[in-house]
Amino acid sequence: MSVAPGLYDVIERRRDVRAEFTGAEVPDEVLARVLGAAHAAPSVGHSQPWDFVLVQDRRTRARFHEHVTAERATYAASLPPDRAATFDRIRVEGVLDATLGIVVTHDPDRGGPQVLGRHAIDDAGLYSTCLAIQNLWLAATAEDLGVGWVSFYREPFLRELLAVPERVRPIAWLCVGPVSHHHDVPDLERHGWRQRRPLADAVHHEAYGRRR
Amino acid sequence: MSVAPGLYDVIERRRDVRAEFTGAEVPDEVLARVLGAAHAAPSVGHSQPWDFVLVQDRRTRARFHEHVTAERATYAASLPPDRAATFDRIRVEGVLDATLGIVVTHDPDRGGPQVLGRHAIDDAGLYSTCLAIQNLWLAATAEDLGVGWVSFYREPFLRELLAVPERVRPIAWLCVGPVSHHHDVPDLERHGWRQRRPLADAVHHEAYGRRR
């Protein structure tokens, strides 16, 4: 996309995509822009603790898909009947349909033992990796690509699948690729799983729970 | 700002601001757009686990500033002499200079006991809150506001200061407000603390550590 779309427009259009991937190719220069946006995220102590593993291999994806399918069944079995019926209609991943998977990992040792700003809050490094994911997601949306964050997996499985070192955590499997369209309304709203919370409920003044 | 700036431009201009806050007013409608952008972030199971506490009270900010100053000293004392000298030149917060603080909190109980997509990865809720922070940061940048994430604090202190309930976690104190200018280069690079990692080092193919 050559005309730069406005930030608010991108934020509004961004969806968590499951079913709309076409599988079409993503040009290298587009992928480079999307990864560059992720890599430009802020990070505690400028530690840049993220990495991106690009997965296209069909066998790797088939193994992951099988694992995710089993985790979906485990979750479904935990639900009361009415929620299980709603959940039954909801797709949770597009691992095989998307053009590629981008697995974002977090290295807690990046930046050495004295990361500036992490002495009091160890999770601050993890937060940085998430900021990179949101930059990636928005950039992909601006490029008319879909992104779907798959979270139905166990970290140890994914670590072994991609030979991720012991202390490095896989944070997200993102399905990425061109899509037929972006829905206006998030899947989980459309399917009656959960509705949007009014912004006013999320805003507090001077102290938690205090409303203006 | 009425002309919508392009996403990549905003991502590129975004800085972690410490010293450049002017303290000028932020119009209500601008703040509403910035918070609306944060609130439009994706979240696991559509749980929207974030909240935003807007802090302008000078006494609250003075108490937080005092705590941050003490934590800065604790960190400085942990450094070897050469790093301590570099750190001495670096500002870590603009708590009193910024127009307001936005404290972003995370409620792990939002969405009930069966959040879709969190049964296997409990931290997935926390990740969602971080995605909201990055949306906020980019929207503020698009509005020509500065944002500075303060992480020199202990969570229990901030929880008590803002009456945050026991299980809710304060994730970030963001200093927000108009700035005199945005630096081209991140503070920590300008001051020789840490340099940018090449993007190529962060990209792996098919498995962690495998280069194309």
Image (spheres, coloured by chain):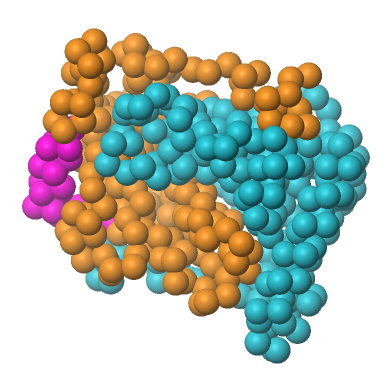
Chain colours: A orange, B cyan
Q: Is residue B110 above or below residue A114?
A: above
Q: Residue at x 83, y 28 (%)?
A: B27
x, y percent for residue A144: 40, 35
Q: Residue at x 84, y 36 (%)?
A: B56
Residue A8 in sight here: no
x, y percent for residue B2: 74, 28
Residue A133 in sight here: yes
Q: Is residue A82 above or below residue B25?
A: above
x, y percent for residue B121: 32, 44
Q: Residue at x 34, y 16 (%)?
A: A193
Is B106 within the magenta? Answer: no
Q: Quadrant of the N terminus of chain B?
A: top right
Place residue B141 in its image quadrant.
Answer: top right
Q: Is residue A1 above or below residue A73?
A: below
Tally the numbered discs. Answer: 0
Q: Nearer the viewer, residue B69 or A19?
A: B69
Instruction: Specify start and end residues of the magenta stretch as a single range.
Output: A54-72
x, y percent for residue B133: 59, 41
Q: Is residue A55 left or right of residue B198?
A: left
Q: Residue reaching furthest bottom?
A: B81
Q: Nearer the viewer, residue A119 or A67?
A: A119
Q: Is residue A45 left or right of residue A105?
A: right
Q: Residue at x 39, y 33 (%)?
A: B44
Is A61 within the magenta? Answer: yes
Q: Is residue B125 above or below residue B82?
A: above
Main SS, magenta region, reads helix
Q: Is residue B12 left or right of residue A102?
A: right
Q: Quadrant of the C terminus of chain B?
A: bottom left
